[in-house]
């Protein structure tokens, strides 16, 4: 797995690719240079707000969320690719990036060359629910396509978000062209508190729910990143990968995320 460790470490250190520009992870060039917005911020994601967020698609239909962590790699959940799906030609799997709506002029579609499932992922258990997608061609970073940083060790964050792809109201539920990104401000809860609501909670999992007093609801987009920031900084770090939850993020019903920090050695 040494080849997989390299892109993760590069993203972790803040170097997205080995080129003269030395693109750094976690920044949002097209978005206001602050992670601190008004308390009642807009639910709909703005252009360039989460430039690492992607839509993983099968036959051009949204399958799962994911995040750009390196010019060649996308991080998502393993359960997005059951064996029956993997048995199909990988040529049907693509990644849409650089956009907050599928009809946006900044969007780009990348072919997936290989899907790599974590070796310890053994459904129905979701303890190691992670996968990496190797792209057929590298991402050309821009204001709307940037890699996210990866959390190296667990810590306390001041503000966190989860964004997911949702259907625009009034459109056909099967018309993926009318999907857009919406976000939810969330807070992590302790393992002790989460264990009261979740049976057999693994140390590899993170629990989070909606920040008190904020608006929004999250249905849960498998593979979507949980990103967090420290007060006064501009860089965002991916803390988790959404795995499962019922009306995820609602008070009393936490969303379950695989902890990125626990899998950096992968």
Image (spheres, grey):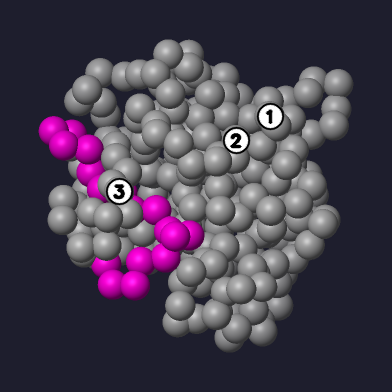
Q: Residue at x 66, y 37 (%)?
A: 12
Q: Which residue is mark 3?
A: 190
Q: Earlier in the sequence, mark 1 or mark 3?
A: 1
Q: Nearer the viewer, residue 21 or 229?
A: 229
Q: Is residue 145 visible?
A: no
Write down the quadrant of residue 193 in the picture: bottom left
| Range of residues picked out in magenta | 198-214
* 1 or 3: mark nearer the eye: 3
Q: Name the residue: 21% across, 64% down.
A: 197
The residue positioned 54% from the left and 67% from the top of the image is: 128
- Whole-Å distance between the Cαs marked 3 and 2? 23 Å
Q: Which residue is mark 1?
A: 14
Instruction: Find the residue positioned furthest to the front.
Output: 192
Whether 238 is drawn above or below 2: the answer is above
Magenta: main secondary structure: loop
- Callout 3 secondary element: loop
Q: Are marks 2 and 1 in contact (CB under 8 Å)?
A: yes
Against 193, residue 129 (above or below) is below
> Label 2: how many residues lie within 10 Å, few (<14), some (14-19) or many (20+)?
many
Q: Nearer the viewer, residue 30 or 107?
A: 30
The image quarter containing residue 101 is top left
Whether residue 112 sits left or right of residue 48 in the image: it is right
Query: Where residue 234 sits in the image (x, y, percent)?
Result: 50, 18
Res 69 seen here: yes
């Amino acid at each position: 797995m040494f080849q997989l460790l390299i892109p993760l470490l590069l993203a972790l250190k803040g170097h997205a690719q080995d080129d003269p520009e030395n693109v750094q992870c976690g920044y949002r060039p097209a978005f206001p240079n602050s992670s601190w917005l008004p308390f009642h911020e807009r639910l709909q994601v703005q252009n360039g707000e989460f430039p690492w967020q992607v839509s993983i698609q099968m036959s051009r239909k949204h399958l799962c969320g994911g995040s750009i962590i390196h010019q060649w790699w996308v991080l998502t959940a393993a359960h997005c690719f059951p064996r029956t799906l993997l048995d199909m030609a990988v040529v049907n799997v693509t990644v849409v990036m650089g956009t907050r709506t599928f009809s946006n002029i900044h969007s780009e579609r990348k072919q997936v060359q290989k899907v790599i499932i974590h070796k310890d992922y053994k459904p129905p258990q979701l303890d190691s629910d992670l996968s990496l997608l190797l792209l057929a061609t590298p991402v050309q970073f821009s204001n709307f396509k940037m890699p996210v940083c990866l959390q190296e060790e667990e810590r306390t964050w001041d503000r966190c978000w989860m964004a997911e792809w949702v259907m625009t109201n009034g459109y056909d539920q099967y018309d993926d062209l009318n999907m857009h990104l919406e976000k939810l401000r969330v807070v992590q809860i302790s393992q002790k508190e989460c264990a009261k609501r979740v049976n057999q909670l693994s140390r590899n999992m993170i629990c989070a729910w909606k920040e008190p007093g904020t608006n929004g609801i999250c249905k849960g987009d498998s593979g979507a990143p949980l990103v967090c920031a420290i007060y006064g900084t501009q860089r965002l770090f991916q803390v988790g990968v959404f795995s499962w939850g019922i009306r995820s993020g609602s008070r009393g019903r936490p969303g379950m995320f695989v902890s990125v920090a626990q899998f950096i050695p992968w």
